[in-house]
Amino acid sequence: MFDKPIPIKRIHARQILDSRGNPTIEVDVVTETGVLGRAAVPAGASKGRYEAVELRDGDLRNYRGKSVLKAVRNVKELISKKLLDFNVFDQNGIDRLLIELDGTENKSNLGANAILGVSLAAAHAAANSLNIPLFEYLHVNSGKYVLPVPFMNIINGGTHAGNKLSIQEFLIAPTGAKSFSEAIRMGSEVYHTLKDILIKKYGVSAKNIGDEGGFAPPMSFTFEALESLSTAIEEAGYRVSKDINLAIDAAASVFYENGYYHIDGERFTAKQMIDYYKQLYKKYKVVSIEDPFEENQFESFRELTRELNNRVQIVGDDLFTTNIKRLTKGIKLGAANSILLKINQIGTLTEAFNTAKKAFENGYSVMVSHRSGETEDTSIADIAVALSCGQIKSGAPARSERTAKYNQLIRIEERLEDNSIYPTNKIGLIEC
Ligand code: PGA
Ligand code: ZN
């Protein structure tokens, strides 16, 4: 596609801080023509068991065991030698080489964090070499770009907050917006209205926020969060489920123990959880439910997907971990109908794009996602547009590591003018 190869001249890595104040890796790829591509790697808290390995040093005297100096060394000493003079436009070749050099199934040798830093920085260097934005360089289809509906996580629970909410994320999706920037305005208005409501009801401490910028009020029950969101949407002048839809990420592996789900002070079986989610759909019109069950419960995912008859988006995050093999298993069984795409769960851009392609081919929708530990890197904004998947989650419309992605999408929308669409009244494959 790009006639003249440009060789990679130098690869450098360093340790920087993520939004939680933990170390993470940043990689610079420089071409022979002197063009720089830079990428930083995020980190999860409620990580899936089947994610590629994030290499950390484990030396308690250094960042309390969390330093990533080994991963940095792997880039500087091993990977940089192998990729020297490699054509920066050959993303497949670069990623294949990284996978082979690592040699393990889960990237535990070099570290998925080291590998992703290089994979992503190379893509940036390639796009910069052509003087085009990353989304254009990575664009998978011809035709108009689709901007994503932003799923804004404005009440935090689970491992992302210090409250008693079992469900990790309560999100709003402004599906009634006519453009991405309008969706952000609607989300921001609801966010600030919600803040006032929470302070009135729960006291001033309710404005404390969780890891993804959403509020972390002292709530214990799911309905409290969904009621507050509904009230905030209405008080901000919008209609629930018409202008703005509700969504959750249960991240249920975290509250699952010995066959039971611990939620709202109850102990539920998988069957009872299916009824529980059906109620949430009936009462609050929740249109997207992520990780409703523990990460090995493919059968439960299938049951819920069937019961809700594809009226609700059932998203596999920890279930699939952006892994094509796990997605393929899910597709065969009919488990879920959507996949969360987190590039650091798998480790290379090529693998993540192949997984997304597999999803599209099989009628599964794709939602691109940040991690709870983020950086100022905005690659996921471009990736969502490149894939035209129509959905992204990047936390609340607050805190710079979250808004960096939304702001990048505002810029992309502006740049594309008439060459993009916002999927009004659509969540993935579902009309709403
Ligand atoms: P994590 O959470 O980044 O902490 O894994 C995000 C999610 O579960 O979607
Ligand atoms: Zn999740």
Image (spheres, rainbow, N blue to C red):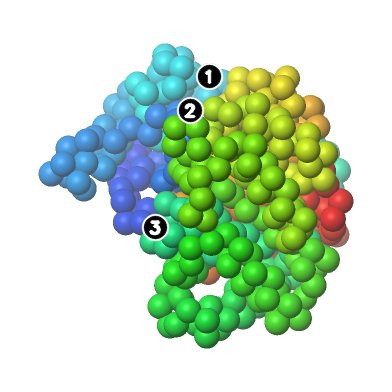
Q: Where is residue 415 in the image (x, y as percent from the top left)?
A: 73, 60
- Give the quadrant of the C terminus: bottom right
Under circle 1, the secondary element is: helix
N-terminal-most mark, 2 or 3? 3
Under circle 2, the secondary element is: loop
Q: Quadrant of residue 407?
A: bottom right
Image position of 17 with respect to 335: above or below: below
Q: Which residue matches tag 3?
A: 19
**Tags 2 and 1 touching, CB below 8 Å:** no
Which marked residue is nearer to the observer: mark 2 or mark 3?
A: 2
- Give the quadrant of the N terminus: top right
Image position of 36 with respect to 363: above or below: below
| Horizontal arrangement in the rendering, residue 311 relative to residue 66 (left or right) | right
Q: Position of residue 223 (x, y in %)?
A: 61, 63
Q: Residue at x 73, y 48 (%)?
A: 278
Q: Which amino acid does label 1 sit on?
A: Arg
N-terminal-most mark, 1 or 3? 3
Q: Residue at x 56, y 20 (%)?
A: 93
How far separated are the C-alphas under marks 2 and 1? Answer: 20 Å
Q: Which residue matches tag 2?
A: 50
Q: Residues within 10 Å of mark 1 (few under 14, many from 20)?
A: some
Q: How many labels does the image show?
A: 3
**Tags 1 and 3 touching, CB below 8 Å:** no
Q: Is residue 211 visible?
A: no
Q: Which residue matches tag 1?
A: 96
How far separated are the C-alphas under marks 2 and 3? Answer: 24 Å
Q: Is residue 240 visible?
A: yes
Q: How crowded is mark 3: few (under 14 residues within 10 Å), some or many (20 or more)?
A: many
Under circle 3, the secondary element is: loop
